[in-house]
Structures are given as C-alpha cells and as structure tokens.
Amino acid sequence: MAYYSIDPRPSYSERHGRGPRAQPLPFETVRRLVVSVLDNLWERAFFQEAFGYECVDAGIVDGTLGADPGAYFVRAILREGVWPYKRHWQDQDPSPPPWESWDADTMFDVLEVLHDLVSEPVNGSHHDYNDCGWHYSTFNRASGQIAFRREMNSVLRLGEPSYEFDDLGQVIETGPVEFRTLLNAPVPEGTEHDLITRKIDAAVSRFQTRGASIEDRQHAVRDLADVLEALRDDIKATMLPADEKALFHLANGFAIRHNNRQQRGDYDRATWLSWAFYSYLATIHAVLRVRIRQHEQASN
C-alpha cells in the first residue's frame, strides 16, 4: 500500500503570515487527525504484532496481547472501553465509536500505550486467497516507535497547547515554537553534572510535563534559579551588574525561591513563571557557552 507522509514544511500562505497553521486547531480536530494516523498505521500492519490479524482461512489470529487486548488497556492505564478504538465494519452498534468520547487525558494515555506496542513489519508473506493480505512474522519495535512518534507529532503539534512525544514515548508540551530550539539545546560538554546539567534536565522535564501544575512550574523555575546561583561568579564576569541583580531579584522577590512576608505573590503566576523559565534557561545557556569560549581563549 502506498503511503505519503505529510511534508511539515510551511505552506505558501503560512510563509506569508496568512496560513491556517497560525491558528491552533481545536482538540476535536486534533483527535480526529490522531485517529487518522492510527488508521494508517493499522493498515500498514504496524500493530499486527501486538493485536494480531484476521485471516480468511485461519480466522482471528491473536497477537502478543492475546484474545482480549482491551484488558491490557485496563491493566496499563485503568481505562475501560477504550479498545478497540473503532467499531468493526460488520458491527451493527449505532453508537459513536469509542474514540469520539476520548478527552485529552484518555487520548494521551491510549497513545502512550500504543507507542509501547507499535512495531514496524519486516518479513512476512502475502496471503493471496480472496486478497487476504500480508501476514508478518518479524517486526522491528524501535523503527516502529520512531515512525509512530514522527507521524503523531505532526498532528499533536497543531493543537493548543502544542504537544509531542519525546524519545521515551511520553507526551509532553512542546512550548512556543520560538522556544523549542532552546528547550532542546544540549548543555556544553564538561558542564558540572550534579550541580548544573542534572538540574537543567530536571527543570525542563518538569516544566514540559503534560498537565504540569503551577507548583510544578514554580519548582522548575526554582531549579533554574539554583543553577544561576551556582553560576553567579561566571554571571558577574559576563553580565552588567544591574542585569545580574535583576535576575536574582526576580527569583527572590516573586515567591519563587523563598517565602517570606516581603515577597510578592499577587501576580499572574502562570505568565510570570513562563517568562522567568525561558529567561533563566536562555541566560544559563548563554553563560555556559561564554564560559566555554573564555576557557578556550585562555588555553590558546
């Protein structure tokens, strides 16, 4: 079966600031697109190893999940009635298919389970009788998961908030488009691990976690403030004194790092925490790179 991947490049109208992608899609539309991707992967046998297939001669051939795949979803995510996500074409039940009742939590839970089950078909045989189709015997889990993430991310990024799968198969918030490079920027080699790298990784992961609370994001900003404190001598060497003071005033004065009566808590926490997070993260990466460059210059 021929398959055509959607080209993620910006369309003509989008490049000129008029494209429909400029406006995020509602959840119901994103959900429909997710199901479309699932349908396509199913037709390409990416779920055949786990869920089995139907043969005109052998009947139902179970996959690795056995005869009741729905029970696996109950065990994995404690959700009843999410699988199969669509009615069988012979099913006479007039009620809507299960996927039409999925809320965001249910959809993302199901997708994370499917990410762990998907596998790309590698070798098999084509059953010609009555055009039965391909029956595969060997599969590649890693390549199947890469394809699953790539194709799901192309639609999950269209909503608001924008989401994507990370390399671990977890759904996370992607953040604004202009900050995605910053979120994915690697820490320079040689950076102190426990003092800096580990805290940066933890902060970014906590901030991007799907459904992160205000407290989670405040914790993430606090971790970055701790990194800035550890880099304070480097900041003094690379920034103007007023800029340095402003950074720590934000952390200490807006109920981010400590709690006392002099701190301010009467502000739009979500907006300010996002601003602080991206400002701190950008500052940290800038200081780390300046530090590396200064060390290289000193050694030459």
Image (spheres, helix red, strand yellow):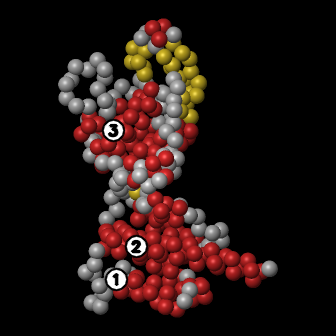
User: CA separation, marks 2 and 1?
Assistant: 12 Å
Residue at 49 percent of width and 52 percent of height? 15
Quick check: 122 left or right of 58? right
Per the image, label 2 sits on a secondary structure element best described as: helix
Task: Give the number of the mark in front: 2 or 1.
Answer: 2
**Given the image, on which type of amino acid does mark 2 rest?**
Trp
Front in this rendered view, residue 144 or 250: 250
Residue annotated with mark 1: 254
Q: Which numbered marker is on residue 157? A: none
Task: Give the number of the mark in front: 3 or 1.
Answer: 3
Residue at 26 percent of width and 37 percent of height? 100
**Given the image, on which type of amino acid does mark 3 rest?**
Arg
Residue at 40 percent of width and 83 percent of height? 250
User: CA separation, marks 3 and 1?
Assistant: 42 Å
Front in this rendered view, residue 79 or 105: 105
- Asked if residue 246 is positioned above or below residue 95 in the image, the reply reads below
- Determine if residue 170 is in view: no
Furthest residue to the left? 94
Quick check: 72 left or right of 198? left
Q: Of callouts 2 and 1, which one flags the residue occurring earlier in the amino acid sequence? A: 1
**Given the image, on which type of amino acid does mark 1 rest?**
Phe
Residue annotated with mark 3: 32
Q: Of callouts 3 and 1, which one flags the residue occurring earlier in the amino acid sequence? A: 3
Q: Position of residue 12 (x, y in %)?
A: 49, 47
Say whether marks 2 and 1 touch (CB < 8 Å): no
How many neighbours does mark 3 have within 10 angstroms: few (below 14), some (14-19), or many (20 or more)? some
Per the image, label 1 sits on a secondary structure element best described as: loop
Residue annotated with mark 2: 275
Residue at 48 percent of width and 7 percent of height? 129
